[in-house]
Image: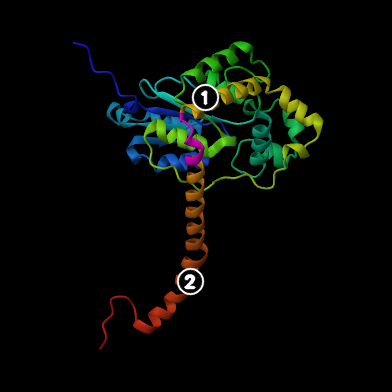
Amino acid sequence: MVADPVDERDRPVIFVHVPKTAGTTIKAIIAGQYADDKVLLGPGTGEQLLEIGRLDDEQRRKIKMIAGHLPVGFPNLVENPRYCTLLREPVDRVVSFYYYVRREPEHYLYDYTQIQGHSLREVMEHRVSNMMDNFQTRLISGVWNVVPFGEMTPEFLDRAKRNLDTFAVVGLQEHFDESMLLLADAFGWDTPYYRSRNVSEGRPRVSEIDAETLALVASSNTYDTELYEYAKEIFARQVAAMGPGFSRRVAQFQRANRRRDRAADFRRNVLTPTRAKLRPIKRALVGPRGSKAD
């Protein structure tokens, strides 16, 4: 007797979170879509792998979504997963990563970039972090940190492209709203409303950085650039498959999301402070809660 095929939506999902591709916002969206015992959203790769390792078989079978800086094919996560990801224009991603590090005291590169004052150019010249060396290709190919800085080869790019071909969704940060709707449709989510989180502030635009530094960044991310172009082709096909009404649906989603944002801002900036100011007056007039008049 042949077993019934597994429904695609019953298969667990791994969201490969490339650093500085709106992952904090996406994780907040994901957290709203799954019960606590069905999702793992690690604060960092090491901590997340430890958390996964502590799960027993029953707990592991419940997991429907894992999101983190996890390379494709990492063993002993969940059985037969579907993959998805968001990619970003590589030079802009590295610039964003560098300035993110400079404002995060807990990051392992903070002292080197902020206290010791090493510039982006110096970080690239000294080959300090693999996260700035074709890291999107590293994660999607599954090679991760095994290969030293500057020693990635076309073989890993080809492997990354083949892996992307199997992904349920390949999104782009530059088309965030379209990507979220693609994810929602693929995995049966409710409407993925969101508020932008962990947005880099005070970082220069790529156009404001000197040409020599940009050239160094680009030369260390040539495979990521090619992979990103390949991802754009996949993304375009995914959007086309949604039909001619998809652009209208995206526009409706964006309007609804802005309305929710404005309502949340009003509650936070107007209603909540007003209620806090009125509370002492109310207590003075009616007495403490639960008290009885004589």
Residue depicted at 58% across the width and 26% down the height: 232
Q: Depth-wise, is mark 1 or mark 2 nearer the camera?
A: 1
> Mark 1: which amino acid?
Arg
Foreground pick, 198 / 242: 242
- In the rendering, which numbered label is found on residue 138? none
Q: Is residue 63 visible?
A: yes
Residue 187, relative to residue 157: is it above or below? below
Please tell me in which quadrant of the rendered image residue 113 appears. top right
Residue 131 percent across, percent down from the top left:
62, 28
Q: Which of the two labelled residues, at mark 1 and mark 2, occupies the earlier sequence position?
A: 1
- Residue segment shown in magenta: 242-249
Residue depicted at 36% across the width and 27% down the height: 12
Other-residue count near label 1 (Cα within 10 Å), few / some / many at <14 / 14–19 / ≥20:
few
Residue 75, relative to residue 109: is it above or below? above
> Mark 2: which amino acid?
Thr
Magenta stretch: residue 57 in it? no
Instruction: Classify mark 2: helix, strand or loop.
Output: helix
- In the rendering, which numbered label is found on residue 237? 1
Residue depicted at 39% across the width and 21% down the height: 76
Other-residue count near label 2 (Cα within 10 Å), few / some / many at <14 / 14–19 / ≥20:
few
Residue depicted at 68% across the width and 28% down the height: 128
Label 2 sits on residue: 274
Foreground pick, 181 / 49: 181
Residue 148 percent across, percent down from the top left:
64, 18
Instruction: Classify mark 1: helix, strand or loop.
Output: helix
Of all residues shown, which one is farthest toward the front? 244
Q: Is residue 80 left or right of residue 200?
A: left
